[in-house]
Amino acid sequence: MSDSETVIQTGKSSSKRNGFLTAISEMPVMVKLALFWLVFIVTAAIYAQIDLLLNQALPLQDPFHQPFLFGDASPVEGPSADHVLGTDILSRDNLSRLIHGAWVSLIVAVTVVAFGIVFGGFIGAFVGYVRGRSETVVMAGLDVVLAFPPLVLLLALVSIYKVRNLTLIALVFGVLSIPTYVRIARASTLGIASREFIQAAEAIGTKRRSILFREIIPNIMPALLAYALISAGFVIVIEGTLSYLGLSVQIPQPTWGNMINEGRRDIRRTILPIFWPGLFLTLTVVSLNMLGDWVQQRVAVRSSAL
Amino acid sequence: MKKSWLKLIAPLFAIALIGAACGGSDSDSESSSSSDTESSTETETTEAPETEDTVLEAGTEAEGDVDTEVEAVVEESSYGGTVIIGLEAEATGLRPWEDGCSSPCLVMMKAMIDTMVERRADGTYGPWLAKSWSSNEGYTEWTFELQEGVLFHNGYSFNAKTLVDMFELQKVGAISAGVVSAAKVGEVVAVDNLTVKYVLTGAHSAFPSFLYGVGLGGVFEPNAANEDFDGFSMNPIGTGPFMMDKRDLDNETIVVRNPNYWMSDEDGNQLPYLDSVQFRPIPDEGTRLDSLLSGTTSMMQTLRQGTIRDARAAKADGADITLLEFQGNNVGGGQYNNNNPPLDDVRVRKGLTQMNNQDAVIEALGGTGISLPGTQWFSPDSPWYSEKVAAAWPKFDFDAGKALIEEYVNDPDRSDGRDVGDNIEVELSCPPDPTLIAAIQVIEQLWSATGMIDVNVTNYDQQTHINYALGAPPDFMGEHGAHCWRWSSNDDPSTFLNTQFAPPTLGIAAAYGLDGIFSPINFPNYFDIEMFGWLVAAISTDVFEERYALYEMVMMRLARDVPVWYSGHTATLLAAESNILGVNGWLLPDGSLGAGFPSAVARWGQVFIDN
């Protein structure tokens, strides 16, 4: 086992559970609050999806139902017992739509992180370690992808397929995220590949594939995860922007961005339909950034010990 | 240990894809929600009669409240000053024959470009650059006497030859060529220096109405246009009361007084009164209103009902502004592609229309108390409006609409080829404007609530939305389904109805012996040979009662076949500081009262600031 692995495993030497609890206990209060908010959002979003799968059997209002069509509620109501966060311009329950909207942000963010880490991380580690012609070709290709405006690509796909569902949006974001992760993974790999433990592994005849998967990739993961948390926040903002412009998932699927867009019509009457999704969006992005910063600091400390 | 990161990533990746797949299908989530909504709706439909009773009968509610009466100015006019107006968009170009010009563009263009005729407050057409006119018995030749002593901004004289030279450009202009075709103009002949004759290829009893629009009636200096075709867009040369001074696209356009303007007021005072007008495109509705309220601008226009509501509230709160509201024939709504199953079946079109709660849609548009529900292509204050049509139009009746859809769904010969009992599929599309998005969701909710309609909601940008309905050559049939659209204008009905409901393809035209007569802008792809005959007959007589009867028959046919649907009539607003006068109550050269401010388009020649 290499020195670096020893260092990286230091925090897990007793048990994973204790390590996790130790990590949480070491968090500053604000980071703990950020983590709490993210857990709440993820839990709420999953709860909403389960509710949909159970045909709305759980105690959560239908995010699509417009009671004003049937005289049950008025558009743009303030908070009440029936609607804790009030209603939107079509009298739909704001809380329910916020929670369902979180699912879109969550899926887009998770897809981007997954695509970035799995594909971007692997490709970056591979070309960073193998180098040579494959590195030149891959990096040149990624430069081309990076140069392509993502909004234009999204508009082109929408025009071609005439659909804007969550799968398409998430996949587009996911694919577009790969080049950045490749660059980070490659840069980290270049640093790690020149370390003594890698040279030692090569000297004793360890297969390159084994070195890549067992030595390099595990060591670049912390940096990728730290970046992933921060990029997830960025992606949520981008998705919100696209939703605001009407270019993300198709209505009536609620998203925080399209809730803000719909609410701005009545901004002179009440700011609540804009305030709530704006608050959820802000808290989520700030939380991801705080957590990402915290992870990054811990990674930096450990890397310096290598 | 070394595989631990894989254990982390694998579920993450799986969750992402599964989640995307589950949540990705909008139809999935809609269907699960719609089943619940259906039960809610069915519960509510027991109260349907009450709901139906509350539906506004067009013309019986808010009439008068929504329009500012056009009346003569009583204050004494004064010279000087500048009006700064916030517009909802920049004009893409200012060439009357070449550039598409909507309301904000017309606000600008009307300052510099005069038209041959103008519309009076009573809806008839009166003199402007054309002093008088007459036609032959068959309405195929129209002779116009022109105003004397009219100069263009560059000093050239306006005369009959000007119109002949203009026609060369108008025949091929991107905008005017269509108008030339619709108006059937074959030739423009200069009879003498101040007399011009329009020779038509067919009868058109309402031909002067075409000279009200800038496409054919907007008078521009043809030499300047020929010398600098593109440059004319930035520096139009007309005979209007103002001349271009500065054109800074997307920021500010300034026009200054034309010292040689041909028109004087009733007391013989040279027009215009103002020193200059500044046009500032401010696309955001709230910002545009705030700019007026804060004094950054002194005037604004809007075509949005929500902004009209906010402007009313601001005035009620004490803002020192004048609200000039106008509700014309233009009516929002949409069209069904009559060429595509299942919308080719009148039961489906009528059923969908009856399930469309107009009041709720107008509420979603922010137009409650502002916008009148539409039942036809004419608003209640139009001379063409028909109570008979209003009564015939299929109003909101959810159960009746659902029954029609059910009848189609259970028809073994249903046109969409699906099995009996299968849901019908309808694409419902609107541009991504917030108010339209709200409105479309109301309709989607109601249609989905039947449990028999799979509604596929889509939004495309404005241009894609139009192209989608237009389709591709040679047939121009369009692939759209139920498509948001606007209908009608305050022009003569022939100017829009005859092209809108001409044969949609050459093949259909040939099938009815109308070789070569087709209209790509028949967006609903609806054609009725009998109705087309009424439209043709309506331009072969100038007797109002005869024409009214023919257009009423046309509207009754639309109420029967329902190729289109309506939401509310489009209310528009010009809001101004209260000392800006003359926007309302300007006069034509013969002393008759002008049309005021239709579609939030001001005439600037007689506007003044009351000091």
Image (cartoon, coloured by chain):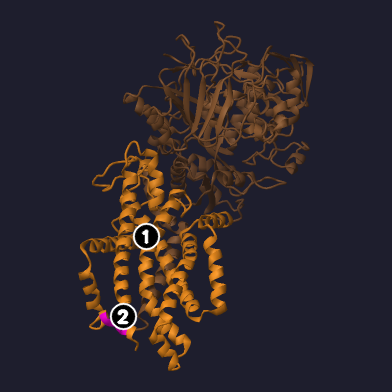
Chain colours: A orange, B brown
Across and down, in percent, residue B456 comes to 51, 52
Q: Is residue A243 left or right of residue B386?
A: left
Q: Is residue B562 above or below residue A276?
A: above
In the rendered image, residue B473, in percent from the top left (x then y), is placed at: 71, 47
The chain identifier of the residue carrying mark 1 reads: A
Q: Which mark is residue A8?
A: 2
Is residue A9 highlighted in magenta?
yes
Q: Earlier in the sequence, mark 2 or mark 1?
A: 2
- Magenta residues, as a range? A5-10
Is label 2 in a helix, a strand or a loop?
A: helix
Crowding at dot 1, Cα within 10 Å, few <14 / some 14-19 / many 20+, comes out as many
Label 1 sits on a secondary structure element that is helix
Q: Which residue is mark 1?
A: A233
Quarter of the figure that contains the C terminus of chain B:
top left
Q: Is residue B376 visible?
A: no
Residue B165's quadrant in the figure? top right
Give residue A80's quadrant in the image.
top left
Viewer-closest of A306 and B407: A306
Any part of residue A24 in sight = yes
Q: Residue B347 appears at what percent x and percent y?
A: 56, 43
Residue ID at (56%, 74%): A136
Which residue is depicted at the point 68% across and 48% down?
B472
Question: Disc 2 or disc 1, which is closer to the eye?
Answer: 2
Q: Amino acid at mark 1?
A: Gly
Q: Please tell me the numbered disc located at residue A267.
A: none
* Quarter placement of the N terminus of chain B: bottom left
* Distance Cα–Cα, label 2 vs label 1: 26 Å
